[in-house]
Amino acid sequence: GGPLSPAPPLQSLAHPVLLPSTSGHPHSLSNAPAEELSNGVMQGSLSVLMGRRVLLREPREDDVVPLFEYSSDPDVTRFLAFAPPASPDDTLYFIAKCREHREQDREYVYVIGGVADDRAMGIIGLRHIDQPMRTAQVGTWLGRTFWGTGANVEAKQLLLDFSFGPLSLHRIEARIAVDNHRSRRAFERIGGR
C-alpha cells in the first residue's frame, strides 16, 4: 500500500505514445556533464536541465508543500498511475523514494520548476528504464495553475533531449489515458504518435 502503489495497468484506457530517437535531435538544453553518465546510466545526482521558461531538477524537501498542494487537486491527479499523497508526510516519502529509485537506476524523477523562481510546478519522470533495450516510459503532471502555459511541452522536450542524448535511449513511451486530451496534445506537439 501507500502513496506509491501502482494503479492497475491502463490497458483498455490508454495506449502508448511513441517518441523514437531521431538523428540530429538537438541536445543543447541539457547541461549534463559527461562524467555523470557511464554507459547511459546516471552516476550521482540528476543533472539540472535548463530550458527557456522551465528547468528540471531533483526533488527537494522544500518542494513538499507545493507538490502536496497540487496533488490534492482531483483534476490534477485523475490520470495518475499511482495514488496521490494523502499528506505532506506522504509527499516527503515520495521524494525519498525518488532518490532511492534514482540510485537504483529504476526511475529518474524531476521537479518541473520555473527558471525565474525555481518554484515547483509539477513532476516529470522516466520510469521503467531498460538500458539494455534503451527504452523508458515518461510521465508528467503539473499543478492546475500551470496548465496551458507551455510548461508541459517544454519539460517533455527537455527530458526527451536528455533521454535521446546523454542517456542514449532509443525509444520513449507514454501511457496516456484516452480522456487525457491535454497530455496527448502536448506529446503530439513534440512529435509523439
Image: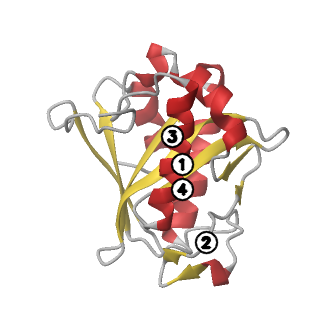
Label 1 – label 4 distance at C-alpha: 5 Å
> Residue at coordinates 56% horizontally, 75% vertically from top-left?
166
Residue 151 visible in image: yes
State the residue in front, 7 or 61: 61
Q: Which mark is residue 114?
A: none
Q: Amino acid at mark 1?
A: Ala
**Residue to which mark 2 is pinned:** 44
Check contact, mark 3 vs mark 1: CB within 8 A.
yes
**Residue to which mark 4 is pinned:** 99
**Residue to which mark 3 is pinned:** 93
Label 1 – label 2 distance at C-alpha: 15 Å
> Residue at coordinates 67% horizontally, 46% vertically from top-left?
60
Residue 143 visible in image: no
Check contact, mark 1 vs mark 2: CB within 8 A.
no
- Percent x, y of residue 115: 80, 44
Q: Nearer the viewer, mark 3 or mark 2?
A: 3
Query: Which sits earlier in the primary sequence, circle 3 or circle 4?
Result: 3
On screen, residue 127 above or below 188: below
Label 2 – label 4 distance at C-alpha: 10 Å
* SS class, disc 4: helix
Label 3 – label 4 distance at C-alpha: 10 Å
The image's colour scheme reads: secondary structure
Q: Position of 47 compared to 75: left or right?
A: right
Callout 2: 10 Å neighbours few (<14), some, many (20+)? few
